[in-house]
Image (tube, helix red, strand yellow):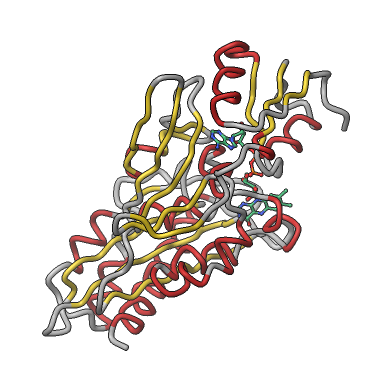
Amino acid sequence: MIPAEFNYHAPTTLDEALSLLDQFGDEAKLLAGGHSLIPALKLRLSSTGHLIDLGRVSGLSYIREDGGRLCIGARATHYEVESSALLRQKCPLLAECAGYIGDVQVRNRGTMGGSLAHADPAADYPAAILALEAEIQTVKSGSKRNIKAGDFFVDMLTTALEPGEILTEVRVAPLTAKTGCVYLKVLQPASGFAVVGVAVVVTLDAKGQCAKVRVGVTGAASKAFRAYDTEKALTGKTPDANTIAQAALQVINGIETSGDIFASAEYRAHLAQVYARRALAKAVERAAL
Ligand SMILES: Cc1cc2nc3c(=O)[nH]c(=O)nc-3n(C[C@H](O)[C@H](O)[C@H](O)COP(=O)(O)OP(=O)(O)OC[C@H]3O[C@@H](n4cnc5c(N)ncnc54)[C@H](O)[C@@H]3O)c2cc1C
């Protein structure tokens, strides 16, 4: 349980962190809350020659509204997301999702940027980030990128982040009128990680029909995904119980669900359908309020 030796760096600015990444290349890893990386280093599932701690880098821990978007700095902790009055009012899905992560210690140290960059297939945020069609901003020496959430999660523990790139900010649109959102999950009792988690954002039109439906699913497969068939099955329809139930059955269309010691692939597929149905019904109920 002792990591292999590494050099520790504590930059205080983003530029300094970027130049350390440039200097040490593949030999370097970024450290945020440490709640995924430190256990991996201790178990020697991962190793690094140079650990670059983002903890003292100023200007990455904010949650604010800017240019019509809600902007969350990469180092905002799960607790800060959960308790943000701005997010609770304008994008309650992120706050609800953060409140479901791990336990108090994990939520106090773990960060949104670290969680997204780590891309654990059982992490909670990816479902919400996909359903919200968020944008992920990154910086690398000399360049900046905006990555759409749909392009960000590539595979298990693999994202679109390039070597030397730092995730700096997540941007989402505030929810519009007649929009309801929810995150529901079946959790592993020991860690809290999602066996299956479903995030839904639904907007109703003046007739009470679904104008827009977005469904993100985590835990069920090697990476989080959007359930496009479910979304299509509900769009333009009146979301009664039967229509929702039929749409929810399509949530794992085209997806190879994963099995492990916590749940078989078949059971995960079943849970995804059941939780999609419940989440859709709840989001519609909230949208109608
Ligand atoms: C007991 C326990 C229970 C947990 N339960 C849950 C749960 O229920 N749900 C859930 O979603 N998660 C859970 N987690 C994981 C937790 O949310 C972690 O905090 C999160 O996965 C990683 O965030 P971090 O800030 O700790 O990142 P770190 O562990 O510091 O880093 C994780 C990875 O991201 C990279 N990284 C970090 N920041 C950046 C950045 N800004 N740019 C680019 N790369 C970066 C690091 O190099 C590393 O590879 C749990 C963890 C523990 C220990």
Determine the residue located farthest toward the right in the rendered image.
Answer: 2
Task: Tell me, yes or no, if residue 267 can be seen here.
Answer: no
Residue at 72% across, 29% down: 10
State the image quarter where residue 41 is shown: top right
- Establish if 249 lies above or below 133: below
> How many numbered marks are there?
0
Q: Is residue 29 visible?
A: yes
Q: Quadrant of the C terminus?
A: bottom left
The picture places residue 181, in percent across and down from the top left corner, at 37, 71
The residue sitting at 88% across, 29% down in the picture is 2
Which quarter of the figure has residue 28? Answer: top right
- 238 vs 12: above or below: below
Q: Residue furthest bottom?
A: 289
User: Which residue appears at 50% of the width and 45% of the height?
Assistant: 258
Q: Quadrant of the N terminus?
A: top right
Q: Taking 105 as reference, is 207 left or right?
A: left
Q: Nearer the viewer, residue 115 or 76?
A: 76
Percent position of residue 56, x then y = 68, 38
| Residue for point 25% across, 65% down | 213
- Residue 202 in the image: x percent, y percent? 28, 70
Q: Decide which of 49, 245 is in the foreground and name it.
A: 49
Q: Is residue 229 above or below residue 25?
A: below
Q: Could you say which is closer to the camera, residue 232 or residue 162?
A: 162
The picture quadrant for ligand 1 comes to: top right
